[in-house]
Image: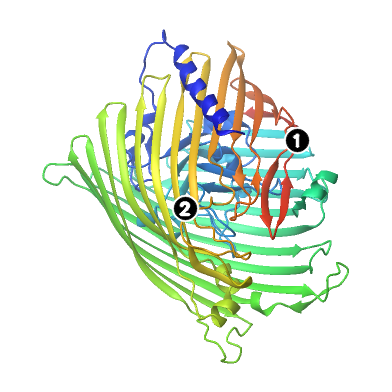
Amino acid sequence: MSCFKVLSLTIFVLLFLPLTVISEEKKKVNKLDEIVVTSTQTENTVIKTPSNISVINSEDIKAMDAKNMAEVIKKIPGVFYTNGSGLEPKLSLRGTHIGMSPGALVLINGIPMSLGKFGYTDYESIPIETIERIEIVKGPMSSIYGGNSARGVINIITKRNPEKIGGNISIAGGSNNDIRASILLQGTTEKLDFNFNVKKKEADGHRDDTYIDNSYINTELTYWLSDNTKIGTYLNYTDKERALSKALTESQRAETPTQSTDYSITRNKDIVSGFIFENRNNSYDFKSNIYYKYRDKYYQNYLKATKTPYKEDLIENVLGIRNIYTLKKQVFDKNNKLSIGFDYDYDDIDLETIKAAAKDATLPYTVKDTKKTGDFTSKKLGIFIQDEFSVLKDLTLTTAIRYDNFSFNNKAEYDFTQSGTYIYDTSPGFDRFNPRIALNYKFLDSSSIYSSYSQSYRSPSIYDYYASGTYSAKYSYTLKPEIYTQYELGLRFSLGKWLNTDVTVYHMEIDDMLDSAYESGTYQGKQNINEATMKGFELSVSGKSVDRINYSIAYTYTDAKYSKYFTTKSGDNINGNRVTKVPRHRVNFDLGFTLLNTKSGDLSWNINYIVQDEFPMDNVNSEYYKGYELVDSTIRFKNKTFEVFIGCQNIMDIDYDGYAYTSSGTNYYYPAAGRTYTAGVEYMF
């Protein structure tokens, strides 16, 4: 897809839509008045938020027929979506999710959702049926959230406080034996709010030997001690099994794109639980969140023995606490909010890895991989202070600084020192200060301009440490955190209900970036030896052009390049090359029509169009993956008691890949599904 075509489409849509609304009466919309909390951890309206923030509510989610949370978020500007297997989606905000490492910090009601040796978030485990809204802040947020937020924050707020006790029962199905069933019960009494959801999902992958079989239970209880004070509990239980296929070479893909040359099987049981105390009044707010997470995971890889088969058994326990106290008191007769907070996270992973004796799928697992076996722990302590001061009536200055201390204990069974020949630090640690300063000026009731400077870090994962242990001992280096620095400038405004716009430009630098190091073609492990610079432009436009037509447009331009002399395995210097798998241009266009509006119910039709530019498949930029365009459509009938929908994804049956890359001169592909269909019904009571 050429840059010209992408830009032409965006300009055409932006010029055309206002022509449909010249006669439309201008009315104030509620989008900019919506209360959000993610950017500062305090309550602000969108119009007063000092950073780019995207908000997706439950009605938006319902209109999409998204199968998981990642499919919901991929439509906003600055978000890149990949799904190599078709069953395990991943997200990258502003192109920062590089390699096998965590992406953005994902929270549910303040509880971090990441688990495992990579620190991934399982987007399938977050039932979209219980979501009230999602707030997404792109870019570094370590000044108040810590190191895991260097790549942005995705904050999920669940449904609560309906007017009466009720719920819904839904079932949906479609291509590839996709079956989803859900029961949601929620309500409120005089003192108690509750939310209970059970969900089952089964599906065959569109490729051979792949499937998913998941069960979820989510429950939330909130008891109001007074009008201002509440205590609550949250529980998310996941029982998940999936078989995922491996990549195909170009010839294999051309032969049979649905084949599975090899695959893996994962079974895991996850528990995410939390206890919440919150007190809000006119003079101060206080919120405390204590959480416990548990994972029991069994993993088998290379079950067709294209490489030596192995298995992993992982037990993980995580205990943490997050607190924030906000004093709301005028200073020099100016509104002021002073926040102080701290959080602590303890993560313990007990891992055992055992290989087969040879590259043969029939052999038992008998050879322990001692480098990947042991007890691995991390401890993270953070303290921050933030002030939001109204310099003028409509000009707010937000400043924040945070101190973090990280420590690791890598008790692998393997002796990386080789009996004292090398020096290997089994207990690395570091600390860091991260500042942020931001301005927001509301120059009209429905318009504001914002700017910010922020610095963040991303600490190495437990996997990063033990996977590079041999090399860091032999070559005498210790992994350090990556440093993220971002400058952001944005404008948001509204021209009545038909046009809500947010325009953002940013410049981000990543220093001490962890990357695979080579010396004369010999691998030397992951090291802090690379740098990258991300520059971008993001445009979000949405509104209701006439009573029965609504639209949203998300355009993303990303210029992501390596910015340091860096030599690859092949000896090429990639300084100035584009960062892998990040397209320059991406457009998402949603158009919704209300076809019928009667006493019996509403009939609506939604069309989604995505166009994406080409991207480099390797850091040498020797190969590029072609751009593509996709069209989805959903027709929905809804009244007070039931809802029916039918949808078609990839209507044009485009042949494309959910993920593609180049390694050692060979191109690898994960073919995506062709045209698929879904249908469902929901009963509300």
Determine which quarter of the picture holds residue 137: top left
Q: Which residue is the site of mark 1?
A: 674
Rendered location of residue 379, percent (x, y): 46, 70
Q: Which is nearer the eye, 179 or 237?
A: 179
* Type of the residue with mark 2: Arg
Which numbered disc covers residue 108? Answer: none
* Type of the residue with mark 1: Gly
Rendered location of residue 322, percent (x, y): 40, 58
In the rendered view, would you say 357 is above or below 286? Answer: below
Determine which quarter of the picture holds residue 265: bottom right
- Ranked by sequence position, the earlier of labels 1 and 2 is 2
Q: Is residue 77 visible?
A: no
- Alpha carbon distance from label 1 to label 2: 31 Å
Secondary structure found at label 1: loop
In the rendered view, would you say 71 is above or below 29? Answer: below
Q: In this view, does 245 lie to the left or right of 416?
A: right
Q: In this view, does 601 lie to the left or right of 432?
A: right
Q: Which residue is the site of mark 2?
A: 151
Rendered location of residue 97, percent (x, y): 54, 53
Determine which quarter of the picture holds residue 102: bottom right
